[in-house]
Image: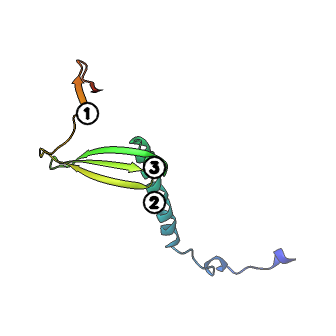
Amino acid sequence: MSFLKRRRRFDRYDEPLEDPISGVANLFDASVVFIVSMMIALFMAYNLLDLVNPKSEVTITKKNADGQMEIITKIGKEIKVKKVTDKKLSGEGVRLGTAYQLKDGKVVYVPE
């Protein structure tokens, strides 16, 4: 007999409306996932996944807009940055050998 009871005409308006801000939270979560996936894709495109591996050894040469070069070396968890200069150095030392450049551009070191 319950289906014979009359329902109020405006029952559906008594229900609370959905919160309009809840959709924004879902967009934020989706954007975070998108940003993380783009970072992983960039690491894979430039073969930089070795930077996050604690057992790997990586050497990167970088040239600034000023023309100054830097050598970035990562051995294990330690990262060192060395700046390359055009200054000529002098000092005392011992001759270790001779280097020859071949026709194809390779350099061969011959110890004495």
Q: Position of residue 13 (x, y in %)?
A: 61, 79
Task: Decide which of 22, 68 is in the foreground and name it.
Answer: 68
Dot 2 surroundings within 10 Å: few (below 14), some, or many (20 or more)?
A: few
Q: Residue at x 22, y 38 (%)?
A: 94
Q: Residue at x 42, y 45 (%)?
A: 57
Tag in front: 1 or 2: 1
Q: Quadrant of the N terminus?
A: bottom right
Callout 2 amino acid: Ser
* Spatial CA span between label 1 and label 2: 58 Å
Task: Decide which of 6, 78 is in the foreground and name it.
Answer: 78
Q: Is residue 91 left or right of residue 43?
A: left
Callout 1 amino acid: Leu
Instruction: Name above or below for residue 2 compared with residue 71.
Output: below
Q: Position of residue 65 (x, y in %)?
A: 17, 49
Q: Which label sits on residue 82? A: none
* Spatial CA span between label 2 and label 3: 14 Å
Q: Is residue 64 left or right of residue 3?
A: left
Q: Which residue is mark 1?
A: 96
Callout 3 amino acid: Ile
Task: Decide which of 64, 93 is in the foreground and name it.
Answer: 93
Q: Secondary structure at mark 3?
A: helix
Q: Which residue is mark 3?
A: 40
Q: Position of residue 33 (x, y in %)?
A: 49, 57
Dot 3 surroundings within 10 Å: few (below 14), some, or many (20 or more)?
A: few
Q: Tell me which numbered mark, 2 or 3, is placed earlier along the sequence.
A: 2
Q: Quadrant of the C terminus?
A: top left
Q: Secondary structure at mark 2?
A: helix
Q: Which residue is mark 2?
A: 31
Q: Tell me which numbered mark, 3 or 1, is placed earlier along the sequence.
A: 3
Q: Tell me which numbered mark, 1 or 2, is placed earlier along the sequence.
A: 2
The image quarter containing residue 6 is: bottom right
